[in-house]
Amino acid sequence: MDFKPIVLIVVTVIYIYNMALDAVRMRSAKNPVPMNVADIYDEETYHKWRAYHAEKTRFSVITTTVSFVITFLLLLFNVHAAFAGLFNKSDFMQLFAIIVLETLVEVAMLPFEWIEAMKIEEKYGFNRMTPKTFFIDQIKKFIISLALMTGIGALLMVVHQALGDWLILAFAGVMTLFILAIAFLFPFLSRIFNKFTPLEDGELKDKLTGLLEKNGYKVRAINVMDASRRSTKANAYFSGFGKMKTIVLYDTLVEAMTPDEICAVFAHELGHGLHKDTLRNQVLTAVQMIVLAVLAWLTLRTAGVFTSFGFSGINYGFALILIMNVEFALIAPLFGLITNYFSRKAEYAADAHAVKEGYGEALITALKTLARKDYADPAPSPLLIKLEYSHPSLSQRFTAIEKQIKPM
């Protein structure tokens, strides 16, 4: 059976789906703005946001189309097999050849990364990267991507060759542990790109420490990240597990908000920790790994998948590309629909914890500041929220927060 037409059709369907999402995004910008978020932007800034939103969406259409054309042509003309033919015939080197080719495709897309970061983001006042920082970041990303993809491909090869049809359980288990390890090591890995300094003593640190102590929550450190080296956008997050858990505040967040507003954002993040949302996310990750393992099992036991694209036998690198970029990409919207639903529920609960801590009003003003700095969509389409948003819309969050504040 020739699987090439099927794969090409799937790749095209994925592309059409992404184009449809961009069309929804474009229409979403014309939605009427709800009253409770009408003060996020003044009239001038709102028009600037719409211009930014439209330009980013149009550019997304271009980059997605270019990526689709490259992928389609590589598959159509069996370029993966031809490129692998330049390498040693060992299973590992054949795997590595495909990963190298995919990295070269990422390099080919580098001009688009440059335009987005150094032109569009610069035009609207978000970018703070120098060309040197941009290229150093890209080199680091390529190296990390090459190492990770090679490692995952090698893992797939070793497990399959050693266990055969037991691949499903073994690969799912090992990949889950691998993802957990990456999450555990994230505080160290993030230092490849950013510098972290302890939050200086003062009112803010005292308030954050008081919140932690009140809830019996311990962290290793409260750090400020030099996000301003790259962007004006702001954020805060928990990183690591157990005794390695760290609070990270963007320096742009510290500069833009009052201590109470930062405490409100932090109380929200603390709510995620107290509600064990990270653990729930790991369960969903394990389910995702099982799905990937089933796809890997089906792919590797179907020789025609490889011969259809010019290979004489199994190529584990090409299998990995098919599994992640074609097969799982086809079902990812359904998976995202489920995970985003639970994520939005968790966001409401985390907001409720901030209200419980007495930071309801401060959370609203903090979220407005974040939205203003990030140029968030004030009125996204309900369809877009269901399909793509891990958070409720700002209007939905404000409505829920205001209802919880009133009884208090």
Image: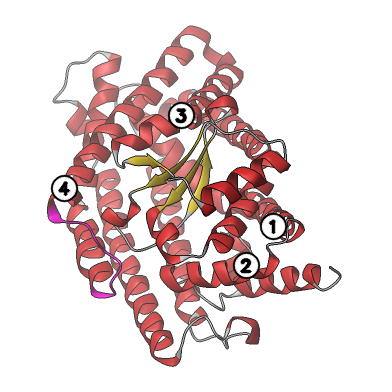
Can residue 358 be seen here? The reply is yes
Q: Identify the secondary structure beneath mark 1.
A: helix
Residue pointed to by mark 3: 182
Please name the amino acid that badge 4 sits on.
Answer: Phe
In three-dimensional space, the C-alpha distance between marks 4 and 2, rounded to whole angstroms, equals: 38 Å
Q: Tell me the quadrant of the picture where the C terminus can be found.
A: bottom right
In three-dimensional space, the C-alpha distance between marks 3 and 1, rounded to whole angstroms, equals: 29 Å
Most common secondary structure along the magenta stretch: loop
Between 239 and 114, the one lying in front of the other is: 239
Mark toward the start of the polypeptide (4 vs 1): 4
Between 247 and 48, the one lying in front of the other is: 247
In three-dimensional space, the C-alpha distance between marks 2 and 3, rounded to whole angstroms, equals: 34 Å
Please name the amino acid that badge 2 sits on.
Answer: Ala
Q: Would you identify the image quadrant in which residue 286 lies?
A: top right
Mark in the foreground, 4 or 1: 1
Q: Which mark is residue 130?
A: none
Q: Which mark is residue 354?
A: 1
Vertical position of residue 63 compared to residue 403: above or below: above
Magenta residues, start to end? 123-131
